[in-house]
Amino acid sequence: MTAGTRAPRLDLPAAMTPAEPSACLRHTGAALSWHQARARAHRLGRAEPLGTEQLSVHHGAGRTLAEAVHALVMLPGFDNAAMDGYAVRGVGPWKVIGRVLAGECAPRRLGSGEAMEIATGAAVPEGTDRVVEYEAAVRGGDIVDASTSGRDHVRRRGQYVTTGQCVLPAGHPLTPAALGLAASVGADIVTVRRQSTARILITGDEIVDSGVPSHGKVRDAISPVLSALLKNWNVTVDGVRVDDRPAEALTAAVDDALDRYDITIVCGSSSVGPADGLHDTVTAVGALTHVDGVACRPGHPQLLAQRGRHWLVGVPGNPFAAVVAAVTIIEPLLTGLNGRDLSVLPSADLQGTVRAAPQATRLVPVHLRGQQAHVIEGAHPGYLGPAAYADALAVIPPGWNHEAVDLLSLTG
Ligand SMILES: Nc1nc2c(c(=O)[nH]1)N[C@H]1C(S)=C(S)[C@@H](COP(=O)(O)OP(=O)(O)OC[C@H]3O[C@@H](n4cnc5c(N)ncnc54)[C@H](O)[C@@H]3O)O[C@H]1N2
Ligand code: MOO
């Protein structure tokens, strides 16, 4: 609910031409470049990592390792068959002297000219030269024969991992496969960063949190999108609350949330209008400002401040601008808090009409098709339509000249 004269229009492409200002020329903070803001949020988080806890590998999904996982066993732990068939020794034909299934031990070693029927994963009998898969074997009675094969179909002990080897370093995200790997090298417990918590504070007298808004009112679109993004980033979003102005109410709510949550996110109130009290609140709660304005379109009026180990993020009230702020500030901050490196962003060639801003990074919703990102027309700071269809946001740097663009995932 900013008031006063509108900011002059910048050189927006057709796809992003809004009916209201998207440039925050009157914004008071010294804007960082988009890359600087992202890097700073990450660096700050990295300097104050979250505490740690120990979790079962069954419950670690989405967490980040605080301590490396070292193998307690060889992988494989023993020489075993990679195929169902016959473990053989020497040249065929072989006499079949028995059978060994997974989990069993062969009763004795193989002699030359002998074979043992074997299941995939079973320990091969001592003396085994190779495993002949059923498909390549010809059996008659207790004799089996096969042509020579190039592969021995034996997975050797320690072929993948040796005991003591670091299989997952600290800072590695516990993806489903990483959890399986930790278990396969014998880990029951992993040491991870604790789950971060966030409180979303929605400001604005015009905002209603359910139902169809009456004239002059606006349905809260930011809580749903922000809550979902935060859950994707493994944050516990502990309640969403609509705070009425006056400024003292916002300050009290922020003060309280800063005490109790890792990240307090104030939506709206970030600009320069008469009801935009976030800057005063930052001062009143004694937080130190690190980012105050980012040279990006949309999403310029972003804020990052710190009180102790607690973080205050201001995101613009325009919902698409709020999404931009989330991927610019909140995601890198969380990446840092979890002790992870900022990932190198994937990139793609951009198809569609978009023009670079001279001094700001533009964030544009795109569909990904193969190696190409296709611009979704109609993006507007106050409208989530194109973002709702997008796979990612393309990062269009100032002065962009049709080079490949970086991509920020919107789908988790
Ligand atoms: N004179 C200036 N006016 C504005 C500037 C500026 O630099 N000088 N910047 C513009 C930009 S850019 C943005 S973005 C907005 C940011 O405004 P605020 O963060 O202060 O947010 P509000 O004024 O409260 O709301 C803006 C807009 O968004 C709607 N809104 C707010 N919260 C929600 C919500 N939870 N769900 C859906 N929509 C929401 C609100 O009704 C307003 O329409 O300031 C510009 N003005
Ligand atoms: O127009 Mo404002 O850029 O952040 O939505």
Image (cartoon, rainbow, N blue to C red):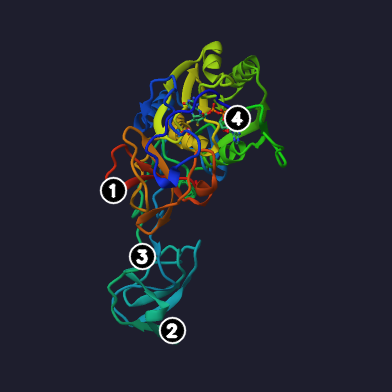
Mark 1 or 3 closer to N-term? 3
Disc 3 residue type?
A: Val
Q: Residue 200 carries which label?
A: 4
Mark 2 or 1 closer to N-term? 2
Q: In this view, does 398 lie above or below 101?
A: above
Q: Do the residues labelled 1 and 3 touch (CB within 8 Å)?
A: no
Q: Is residue 118 above or below residue 341?
A: below
Q: Which mark is residue 154?
A: 3
| Residue at the bottom extreme, as displayed | 140
**Foreground mark, 2 or 1?**
1
Residue 76 appears in which quarter of the rendering?
A: bottom left
Mark 4 or 3 closer to N-term? 3
Mark 2 or 3 closer to N-term? 2
What residue lies at 32% left-to-right and 69% top-to-bottom? 152
Q: In whole angstroms, how far apart are the C-alphas of marks 1 and 3?
A: 51 Å
What residue lies at 72% left-to-right and 37% top-to-bottom? 214
**x and y percent of residue 364 in the render?**
42, 44
**Foreground mark, 1 or 4?**
1
Label 2 Cα crowd, 10 Å radius (few <14 / some 14-19 / many 20+) = few
Q: In whole angstroms, how far apart are the C-alphas of marks 2 and 3?
A: 23 Å
What residue lies at 64% left-to-right and 36% top-to-bottom? 220
